[in-house]
């Protein structure tokens, strides 16, 4: 699963990406289009449960869940009409599963804001408007073909026409598609369009390093907007994160303590992006490795097994499951089994976040 980091030029987007991925993505303070091709990085999703598991099951290695981040070039007003290579940049957004929008929530005379003043809601509106216009173009281009096919009696095309018309009406009311409820067949019929306003979104408020809790009124505006649209907000100082990323572990811990943080923002952002994508983790635990596996919320046991190997899903027999609380109470898998706490689940079992599993399957 991928999350695309977007934002207007000079909001700290690439600075934050570099800090999160410890990469050297092209960046500059006052040149809006320094990022032309999207930079990509894989980040671990911090999960304190892994450490708790390894207290009782000591592995040769521990593998956390991972998330792919894509740093997409700064978007400007008119991007949907090709401004600033907009069409190329918008095509990158179509390919990701969720959007992480960085909005600037601090004043700095040394860093020019592309619109001349700092207004995070205006930034959000600019990008949302461009994505809405781009989605309207996509739908308009697809409607005529869907209507012609529907007139021949094609049932799927009729569903697609209905979905497109619903989406058009919603977008024309200046509402993103993530707030529109479509039936499952309708959503499936237009899934290949890659509609950008249908993607879940996470707002990252880039705050001053002296306002890490986000008490600035600008951040409150972002929170209020997010609340009305069902999104989450994370506060982070991209400048501070960039400084932390350059330190060794000991110096990093000291600096975190000095500013009153327990961990770098990676933890908060990765976990929030994970949640925004509708993902959760289950674990496998043994002497070779303790590992977190990524699955969508609502995945069944066979689907979870398929994340390890497709043959596990095809040949699924049953799943043996216990919880971290069971492990901490009884101290070992053997004791869990003897206490009758090891559950045996079948093909219809819906996985819970944090399940610790063994899958039995046909070879």
Image (tube, helix red, strand yellow):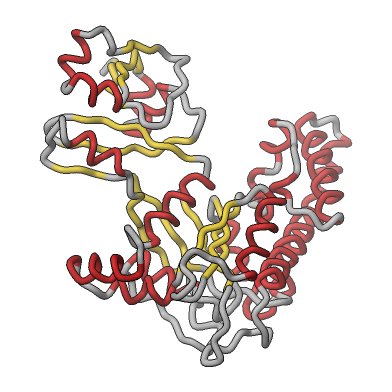
Q: Is residue 145 above or below residue 250?
A: above
Q: Is residue 306 above or below residue 233?
A: above
Percent of width and height locating residue 55: 16, 35
Q: Residue at x 43, y 70 (%)?
A: 16
Q: Residue at x 85, y 43 (%)?
A: 148
In the image: residue 254, left or right of residue 1: left
Q: Is residue 101 above or below residue 359?
A: below
Q: Is residue 28 above or below residue 357?
A: below
Q: Residue at x 41, y 64 (%)?
A: 40
- Image quadrant of residue 316? top left
- Image quadrant of residue 154? top right
Image quadrant where one finds the C terminus: top left
> Looking at the image, how many numbered discs can be counted on the residues?
0
Percent of width and height locating residue 287: 12, 31
Percent of width and height locating residue 80: 72, 70
Q: Residue at x 47, y 67 (%)?
A: 71
In the image: residue 345, left or right of residue 330: right
Percent of width and height locating residue 86: 65, 74
């Amino acid at each position: 699963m991928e999350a695309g980091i977007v934002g207007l030029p000079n909001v700290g987007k690439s600075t934050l990406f570099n800090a999160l991925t410890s990469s050297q993505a092209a960046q500059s303070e006052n040149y809006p289009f320094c990022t032309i091709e999207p930079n990509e990085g894989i980040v671990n999703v911090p999960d304190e449960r892994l450490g708790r598991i390894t207290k009782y099951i000591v592995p040769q290695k521990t593998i956390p869940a991972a998330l792919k981040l894509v740093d997409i070039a700064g978007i400007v007003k008119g991007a949907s009409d090709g401004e600033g290579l907009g069409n190329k940049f918008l095509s990158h957004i179509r390919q990701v599963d969720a959007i992480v929008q960085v909005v600037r929530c601090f004043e700095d005379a040394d860093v020019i804001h592309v619109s001349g003043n700092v207004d995070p809601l205006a930034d959000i509106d600019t990008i949302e408007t461009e994505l809405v216009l781009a989605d309207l173009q996509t739908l308009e281009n697809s409607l005529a073909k869907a209507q012609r096919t529907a007139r021949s009696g094609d049932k799927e095309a009729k569903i697609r026409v209905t979905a497109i018309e619903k989406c058009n009406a919603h977008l024309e009311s200046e509402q993103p598609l993530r707030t529109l409820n479509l039936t499952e067949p309708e959503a499936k019929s237009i899934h290949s369009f890659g509609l950008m306003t249908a993607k879940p979104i996470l707002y990252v408020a880039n705050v001053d390093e002296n306002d890490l809790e986000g008490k600035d009124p600008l951040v409150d505006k972002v929170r209020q907007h997010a609340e009305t649209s069902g999104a989450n907000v994370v506060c982070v100082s991209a400048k501070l994160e960039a400084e932390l990323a350059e330190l060794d572990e000991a110096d990093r811990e000291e600096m975190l303590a000095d500013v009153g943080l327990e961990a770098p923002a990676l933890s908060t952002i990765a976990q929030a992006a994970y949640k925004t994508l509708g993902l959760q983790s289950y674990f496998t635990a043994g002497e070779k490795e303790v590992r977190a596996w990524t699955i969508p919320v609502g995945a069944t046991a066979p689907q979870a097994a398929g994340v390890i190997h497709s043959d596990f899903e095809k040949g699924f027999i049953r799943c043996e499951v216990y919880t971290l609380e069971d492990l901490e109470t009884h101290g070992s898998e053997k004791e869990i089994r003897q206490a009758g706490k090891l559950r045996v689940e079948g093909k219809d079992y819906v996985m819970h976040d944090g399940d610790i599993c063994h899958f039995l399957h046909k070879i």
